[in-house]
Amino acid sequence: MEFIKNNFLYVLWFAFYFIMAWLFLGANWDSFYKVTIIYGVSIGIALSPLGEVLFRFINGARKPATNKEKEYLEEIFKEVYRNAKGKNENLSSNIKIHISNSMYPNAFACGRNTIAVTKGAINIFSEDELKGVIAHEFGHLKYGHTKASIVTFIGNMFFSVIIAIVQLILQAIDSFSSAFAETSRNIAVIVIAGICKVCVIILNLYIFAINIIGQLLLSANSRRNEFQADKFALDIGYGEELLSSLCLLEKFNGENKLTMFQQMTMSHPYMEKRIARLEEAL
């Protein structure tokens, strides 16, 4: 129940994907079982150790290699891990630290047991600031944010495949009927060609609307997740360290003038809002 509560919009959108896939496949018990099996197997693989390796590869996360990386980063990680685990016994015991070669100061969690920091973060953040950033990423794992994003990704992928197949079929029919209508004076053929074009337009508008709505909902949930992960870092004793790192990141981000839609689809809240909340809590 805590997982659903913390990731309600992700779960809601996954349910939508599931229902739409079920409707496209016939909306009967047979199609329900097929969709359930396909989704179950896909999610099971994504949440398995194999899926963990795949997500690390996709995100360019590697194990610490040099002695400096191992001695410096792993010691910082172990300290934060002990404090996080001490106050949250249900936190996984298999979480590992990895490195991304990006020079932009950042960190991310993926899969169920992976936290990665960029080379930029290692070079720019102080030791304490790095602890705050890593504590924030433990929050994402603790509240199941990364698992929710995996489940949504699987749902979206399967639904997108179905939509793509339907689009190809309709476009093929549209192309064939349009070519035939150009050489025919038969009213029925011309009407069918017109209906096909209307169906293609309606489907494209439907896909566009679904993508927009999904983007708005998932972005809203993602911004909420960031505040929740900040609160986790604060609760395990790294609020000041995280605040210092966010203040430094604010200088890197600079001033960005965004449209209303861009603001509504941001995956992260404005840095000022996160800083303000931490300052108030501290």
Image: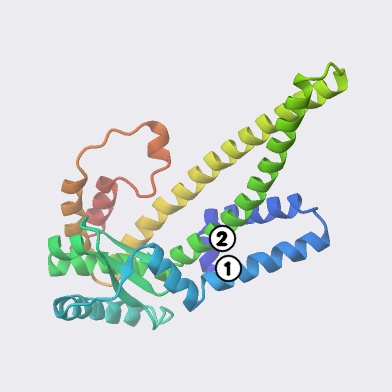
Nearer the observer, 66 or 104: 66
Residue that mark 1 sits on: 43
Give the residue at x 12% y 65%: 126
Which badge, 1 or 2, is on the more N-terminal residue? 1
Alpha-carbon distance for marks 1 and 2?
Answer: 7 Å
Quarter of the figure with residue 78 = bottom left
Type of amino acid at the residue the image marks with label 1: Ile
Q: Is residue 140 visible?
A: no
Query: Which dot marks residue 167?
Result: none
Q: Is residue 86 visible?
A: yes
Q: Position of residue 270 (x, y in %)?
A: 30, 45
Nearer the observer, 146 or 2: 146
* Pointers 1 and 2 in contact (C-beta within 8 Å): yes
As drawn, is 221 to the left or to the right of 96?
Answer: right
Nearer the observer, 59 or 109: 59
The extreme front residue here reads 183
Q: Is residue 155 above or below residue 73?
A: above
